[in-house]
Image: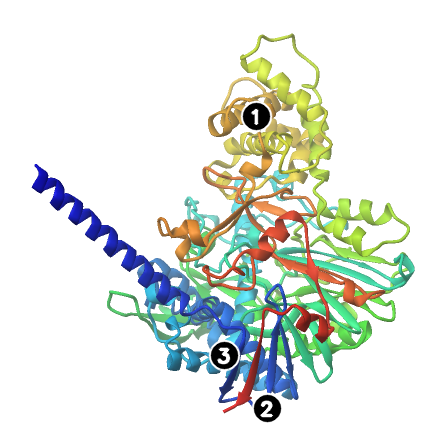
Amino acid sequence: MKRVFTWLLRITVALVAMCTVLVVAIYYLAARSLPDYEQNIQLSGAHGPIEIVRDTAAVPHIFAQNDYDVFFGLGYAEAQDRLWQMFMMRRTAQGRLSELFGDRTLKVDQLMRQLDLYSLATASVEAQTPEALEALTGYAAGVNARLREINEKALGRGTPEMFLFPAQIAPWTPADSLAIMKLMSVQLSGHLEAEVLRAQISMALTPERVKDILPDVPGEGIAALPAYAALFDQTDLPKFASYAPDTNPLSPFNEMDFAGASNAFVASDTRSAAGGALLANDPHLGFSAPTIWYLARLELQSGGVIGGTIPGIPIILSGRSEKLGWGVTSAYLDDQDLYIEELNPDNPNEYRTDKGFEPFTERPTIIRIKDQAPQTFTLRWTRNGPVMPPDHYNIGSITPRGHVAALAWTMLTPHDTSFSAAYKIMTAKSVPAAIDAGEDYIAPAQNLSLADAQGNIGMKLIGAMPRRQANHQSEGRMPSPGWLSRNRWRGRFDYRSVNPEFLNPEGGILGNTNNKMVDRPFPEHVSFEWGDTERIQRFQRLMQARKVHTRESFIEAQLDTVSVTARTLLPLIGADLWFTGEAAPEGTKERTRQIALQMLADWNGEMNEHMPEPLIYSAWVRALQDRLIRDDLGPLANRFHHVEPLFIERVFRNIDGASQWCDVRQSETTETCAQMAQLALDDALVWISETYGSKLQSLRWGDAHLATHDHQVLGEIPVLKYFVNIHQSTSGGDDTLLRGLTKGTGKDPFLNVHGAGYRGVYDFADPESSVFVTSTGQSGHFLSRHYDDLGVRWRLGEYVPMSLDPELARAANLGITHITPQ
């Protein structure tokens, strides 16, 4: 027995020792790729000396004698901190994810190849201005210098992820940066899915009820559209098939609810307490670890600029210089149209045009797949655009037999000058100059908010506006026959006269929350689909509550958590429930309902993470919408993951007979809206009890509304996910200015998955007091202390200084890298 014990002890000690050695070895290899911010290094590709000063937040301040070397420094710094992120975005744009991840990403690769995004980016390089091309080439040289350094010094393959997913990293090129910019268009697009959904809904409901569930944003009246079935022979339309959204974290194709958002607030010097213009911007994108945003300061020949970049794109997309501040919000411009193309019944390689049948443009492509044989696909295009696969957003459910669907999209421009336009905006000295610079911008469409040191403010929609004909059959809201000339685009509208523009308004305040910007009839309408009808109301209230504003009041607006939606809907859906009913004993369903109603009656609509009322309210309206639409829409109800406030309001105000949604068609009795509200509240309380416990007063909204910054790849690996994923309790909600868009599906529908990854507030009365923050940290290396350090400040509503004073950056730096040409 003693011998057995001795051997077991020896084996245990040996196993512990082996595990310890293994852990130490893994840590050593992973830590090798941690960048050294304090070094003197010679690098080939640089033209002159470069200095990269890392301030206390690890933000690189880059100084050089020419702009090429400044962008060289930016490329080197971003490759130090975000190499895996850049590598993944490039592979996504190229349609080459399956080489690493097998057939789980095959659908993504097929779609990216079909869009031909990378070829379009390559063709766009020669269309850039000399200054923009200098930035692209300098940046690429800096990235490649870091790649050579990794190889020569054996720096842990540059990133820990490369040990699990080994692959050769090709040199960076200017086309790679342009491809990532186009990839952002993919992530910010939502009109394609909106067209498909409207077509599906129009085949299931009457036009009046379509307007309920897909409400038009209040404003100029919209002419009635034909039912989708009226555009095609209804007998040829397929039956609706259930649709499961692509939840692959590696896919850039978002559902329309997650197709980008943002806030921007601007005040002129006449509305500023200190006498200088103010600008606040917080772009909203899907959360990830690390965040998509990377902070940097560039000392260009035209002056210093500082703000948020996206790794791989050498431009400050939101930030400031000494003379100008700029920010971006998603414009929701309708820049996509889906066309139904009729195949030649005698030759499926041809499609119908107004001049007869013409052959598709075709090209084979080979996709290499990990641990499998390569697959060859034939890519096809019509004159309207690439032919889309039928399972993409369930396009096949609205494509008649003998037809295919093709996509027109401004992003598919082969000589795209968007990067050059963004470069000109970054180096502009005034609001008018920045507006002029936006003329060559194509996609993704943005609302550009501006403020300058002279006190001017402005806002301009930048992006190509497709010119549709006034007699377009569906006005771009649904797919239309591609062979009819009336449905096809006629170039783009004139930027200066048609793209919405606001310059120095009389009230001295401008803002955008992705709300409807203009009230113009089709075809100069900009869009029928908008991202916000609720946040804009809170913005107006906060801006008009003060005669003058300060940096602090703009920060307060960015962090505001009051839900106008809750304040509007609760009195409607609870009108017949407040303070009614007899006293009920403790522990009964009736008693729980009464407690919940009392709590909501005393609540001011603040979506605070520490309060229980936001969770009760959110669960209630979610359950209510599902009860209202489930029997009418069937499987289509699964497409509505988030509450549509205008729909709930129309139903409970009985606008155009919308209260009939409250009646369950399959039942013999006629249900009222008050009954549906009560049943939905009971549904919500049962779900809350099963998920979070029955004690309503002890609930915390933040426990359900965790901000989930997950690593796209490592975030799914057991044990490791606890080190790489960043989860934080957060306030806000779907419709608050501090926007935290909920997941909407699964067992945790209220997880915060989409919001402000970057916040910046720029004050031209005292530019050095400007501030910014991101939602994680500068580093993409999970062993770095800068992986999540800014995320703590972000959650608490804190910021870091945005200074262009080089001495302040050097005063408490983390390290200075001196680069000299090799």
- Amino acid type at image mark 2: Gly
Residues at marks 2 and 3, CA–CA distance in whole angstroms: 16 Å
Marks 3 and 1, the one that precedes in the sequence: 3
Counting residues from the start of the chain, the first of labels 2 and 3 encountered is: 2
Mark 2 crowdedness (10 Å alpha carbons): few <14, some 14-19, many ≥20? some
Q: Position of residue 244 (x, y in %)?
A: 42, 47
How busy is the neighbourhood of tag 3: few (under 14 within 10 Å), some, or many (20 plus)?
Answer: many
At label 3, the amino acid type is Val
Identify the residue under disc 1.
680
Q: Nearer the viewer, mark 3 or mark 1?
A: 3
Q: CA distance from mark 1 to mark 2?
A: 68 Å
Which circle, 2 or 3, is nearer the viewer?
Answer: 2
Q: Residue drawn 65% across and 51% down?
A: 531
Above or below, comparing residue 318 to residue 473 in the picture: below
Regarding residue 599, the answer to whether it shows in the image is yes
| Color style of the picture | rainbow
Residue 28 lies, in percent from the top left, at: 36, 65
Which of discs 1 and 2 lies nearer the camera? The answer is 2
Q: Label 2 belongs to which residue?
A: 48
User: Which class describes the residues within 10 Å of circle 1: few (<14), some (14-19), or many (20+)?
Assistant: many
Residue situated in front as seen by the camera: 690 or 296: 296
Task: Give the CA separation, mark 3 to mark 1.
Answer: 55 Å
Going from N to C along the chain, the mark reached first, 1 or 2, is 2
Could you tell me residue 647's position as x and y percent?
Answer: 65, 38
| Residue 143, disc | 3
Callout 1 amino acid: Ala
From the viewer's side, name the closer residue of 404 and 329: 329
Q: Is residue 20 left or right of residue 688?
A: left
Closer to the camera in the image, 543 or 465: 543
